[in-house]
Image: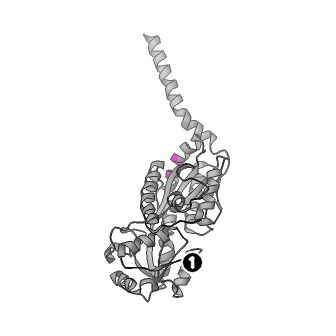
Amino acid sequence: MTALLARIRKAAFFAAVLALCPWSLAQTTWPARPVRLIVGFPAGSTPDISARALADALSKTLGQAVFVENKPGASGNIAADQVAKARDDHTLGVLINGNLTSAKLLYPKLPYDPARDFSLISLLTTAPLVLVAPPNLPGGSQFFAAARSAGNRWNYGSVGLGSVGHLGMELLQSKVGKMSAVHVPYPGNPQIVSAMMGGQVQMALVPPGIAMPLVHAGKLRAIGLSGGRSALVPDVAPLSEAGVHDFQLEVWTALVGPATLSKAAQLRLSIAVPQAMHDAQTRQILFNQGWSALGTSPEGLQSRIREETTLLGAIIATHGIKLE
């Protein structure tokens, strides 16, 4: 009986060791060298800020250098394609909403498939959009009354066709009714702001990190938020309080790897990324730059992609938006 118990205990011990092996293997074999985070926008852009905060925190958690490489162009799709085709097992991408939701609907010749070519890792950061206007225009519901009266004599800016700012403004116009401002695309948010201050553009949906310093300086007026109340911008009311209902839209960043990313890397990142994004210093850095830090599971990211693809897909279909 004693010998049988000893064999049982020995078998249980080895079973426990084997159960821990995948985690131990992931800890010791990945990452074997520095990790590259590709961002599809210039240094200093809002996605870049998110990526660099993650890189700093993740390098401490992983025990390897994590560096950001900027590959701007095509609304982040050039960088997304590079991540999809990476085969070194140490290249990841910090992508935005559009790369994972609307890109495939907008670009028939998109060189990557968001549903097939990525390993989803985490929804990193989110932020509401702020509807801004020149300070000489009225606020609240009076702003929309003026916009309806102006018809297509007003312009709105975005960072490009098919961007969240573009699709979000089309969604907003459908919610307001009889509002027909004309879309004017710009290379980036700084150019939108300059055009707004110069009188060429009357409104735009921009991230709070860009909007609020200018609002506080009296150079722009905040009309409202594209969602509910937010700690990021506690002094700006939701657009629902100005009479715009059922308008929920955020900008966000996500961490993905190529579909070929090893299971060891995915396992390690599933622990390391939430840990990095819940670090108090990292959260404060991101908050100061207009981002709420999340660090979700892959399932959390998948849920957000599914919901937003449905929302933005309806806008694209309604307006027949297609890009080359």
Which residue is at the front of the view, 122 or 81? 81
**Circle 1: residue type:** Pro
Q: Quadrant of residue 312?
A: bottom left
Regarding residue 131, the answer to whether it shows in the image is: yes
Q: Secondary structure at mark 1?
A: helix
Is residue 271 one of those drawn in magenta? yes
Label 1, on which residue? 190
265 w.r.t. 284: above or below:
above
The residue at the point 53 percent across, 80 percent down is 193
Residue drawn where x is 56% and y is 83% of the image: 194
Quick check: 38 left or right of 5?
right
Q: Nearer the viewer, residue 23 or 113?
A: 113
Q: Is residue 237 visible?
A: no
User: Residue 291: x percent and y percent?
Assistant: 48, 65
Q: Residue furthest bottom?
A: 136
For the stretch drawn in magenta, the main secondary structure is helix
Circle 1 Cα neighbour tier, 10 Å, few/some/many (<14 / 14–19 / ≥20): few
Depth order, front residue of 267/301? 301
**Residue 267, above or below 112:** above
Residue in view at x 42 percent, y 57 percent: 307
x, y percentage for residue 43? 63, 68
Q: Position of residue 79 (x, y in %)?
A: 62, 59
Span of residues in magenta: 270-274
Is residue 163 magenta-colored?
no
